Structures are given as C-alpha cells and as structure tokens.
Amino acid sequence: MLPNKIKVARIDYQIQEVEEIDDDPSVMGACVYQKSTIKIKIGMSENKKEQTLVHEMLHACFNEAGFHEQDEDVINRVGIVLYQVLKDNKLSFMSTYLPER
C-alpha cells in the first residue's frame, strides 16, 4: 500500500493513484512539481507501484535540490537500484507508512 504523501525538502507531495497519466496508457508515473503531486498508475502490481514511486520521488528530490534539467536515464537507473536496496534490506517503509503525528 502506498503512502498518501511524502515529504521532500519540507514540501508535502501528495500521492495519487490514477487511471491514466497525460492521456498516455504507457506512462506509469509522473511528478507534478508545481502542484507537489506524484501520480501512480492504478492496475500495476504493488512492487511496480512502489518502484514507480521511488522513481518519482527521485524526480522530486532532484527538483527540490535545484536540478531542474534531469536525465531520465539517470533517474531510471538510480531508481531501480534504490528500490532494490530498500526492498532487499527490508527498508520497505512504504508498506509500514505511519502518518506524521
């Protein structure tokens, strides 16, 4: 189960599961910086949703760090490895997300 929001550089990014992104059925996720929103496509496996969320979180991190021009290949590669590290080391915070008190 995905969290409802994540905090990146003190900005709350709302997580939304949607049917389609940008009218393109092949797009699995998107990070909308201006609205502080991450969209994840409904209908994927939980692992694929989590991997896509990590990918979109990286976009948010890079953007908030001032990297407005991002190399999609770099985000893809780092996202896949980061997701693997989180899962293999049982750091799957996504399935145990607790809202801030």
Image (cartoon, helix red, strand yellow):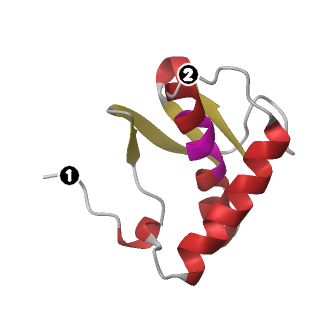
Residue 44: x and y, percent?
71, 63
Q: Would you place residue 88 above or below residue 66 in this image?
A: below
Q: Is residue 13 left or right of residue 55?
A: left
Q: Is residue 2 left or right of residue 48?
A: left
Quarter occupied by residue 20: top right
Q: Is residue 18 left or right of residue 12?
A: right
Q: Which residues are magenta?
A: 55-60
Identity of the residue drawn at 60% across and 62% down? 50
Q: Would you place residue 23 above or below residue 66 in this image?
A: below
Q: Is residue 56 left or right of residue 74?
A: left
Name the element at disc 2: loop
Q: Earlier in the sequence, mark 1 or mark 2?
A: 2
In the picture of the structure, the residue carrying the numbered disc 1 is 100
Name the element at disc 1: loop
Residue 35: x and y, percent?
49, 21
Residue 45: x and y, percent?
69, 70
Residue 34 in view (yes/no): yes
Q: Amino acid at mark 1?
A: Glu
Q: Amino acid at mark 2?
A: Gly
Identity of the residue drawn at 60% across and 54% down? 54
In the picture of the structure, the residue carrying the numbered disc 2 is 66
Identity of the residue drawn at 69% across and 55% down? 79
Residue 27 in view (yes/no): no
Magenta run includes residue 58: yes
Identity of the residue drawn at 43% across and 38% down? 14
